[in-house]
């Protein structure tokens, strides 16, 4: 049984029959979407700040310049916070027809525990 929760107070349960899966898995790396968005926010806000700074020419920055600076700082902080999870590893178990049957994601940076768990699932599939 697979239990998942994407939204608070909303749980999803799904039963995956192990005999319907192949014994080998394929490793997949997915980029964390929030990390990519933080980079875009930082880049665009920095461009707007640079435009406002050069347009001011030794005068005080306008409101837009300070807002762009704040958004750029926010983007940099978000980039720093999401850096450890910029890539998420998955073990994908396929069905005999070649379609994905079960994906197991690495919840943290402990790759040894992830690989151990994926190997345990692989042995369990081969036993069934």
Image (cartoon, helix red, strand yellow):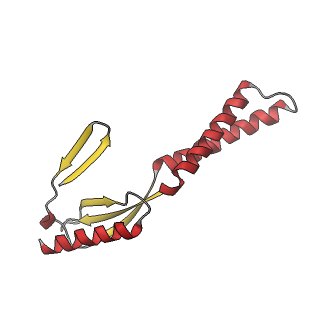
Q: Total number of numbered labels?
A: 0
Residue situated furthest right in the rendering: 58
Q: Give how far across and how far down residue 39 sits, in percent.
A: 58, 48
Q: Is residue 6 left or right of residue 101?
A: right
Q: Residue at x 18, y 50 (%)?
A: 14
Q: Is residue 31 left or right of residue 120?
A: right
Q: Give how far across and how far down residue 83 sits, in percent.
A: 54, 54
Q: Residue at x 66, y 34 (%)?
A: 70
Q: In terms of image quadrants, where is residue 109?
A: bottom left
Q: Is residue 103 left or right of residue 53?
A: left
The quadrant of the picture occupied by the C terminus is bottom left
Image position of 118 with respect to 56: above or below: below
Q: Give how far across and how far down residue 18 sits, in percent.
A: 15, 65
Image position of 6 with respect to 106: above or below: above
Decide which of 120, 23 is in the foreground and name it: 120
Image position of 81 with respect to 53: above or below: below
Q: In terms of image quadrants, where is residue 8?
A: top left
Q: Residue at x 26, y 48 (%)?
A: 4
Q: In terms of image quadrants, where is residue 118?
A: bottom left
Report if residue 117 is visible in the image. yes
């Amino acid at each position: 049984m697979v239990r998942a929760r994407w939204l608070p107070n909303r749980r999803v349960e799904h039963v995956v029959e192990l005999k319907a899966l192949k014994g080998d898995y394929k490793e997949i790396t997915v980029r964390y979407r929030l990390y990519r968005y933080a980079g875009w926010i930082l880049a665009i806000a920095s461009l707007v700040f640079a435009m406002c700074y050069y347009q001011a020419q030794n005068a005080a920055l306008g409101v837009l310049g300070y807002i762009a600076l704040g958004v750029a700082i926010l983007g940099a902080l978000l980039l720093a916070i999401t850096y450890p999870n910029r890539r998420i590893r998955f073990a994908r178990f396929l069905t005999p027809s070649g379609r994905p049957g079960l994906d197991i994601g690495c919840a943290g940076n402990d790759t040894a525990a992830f690989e151990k768990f994926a190997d345990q699932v692989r042995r369990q599939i081969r036993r069934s």
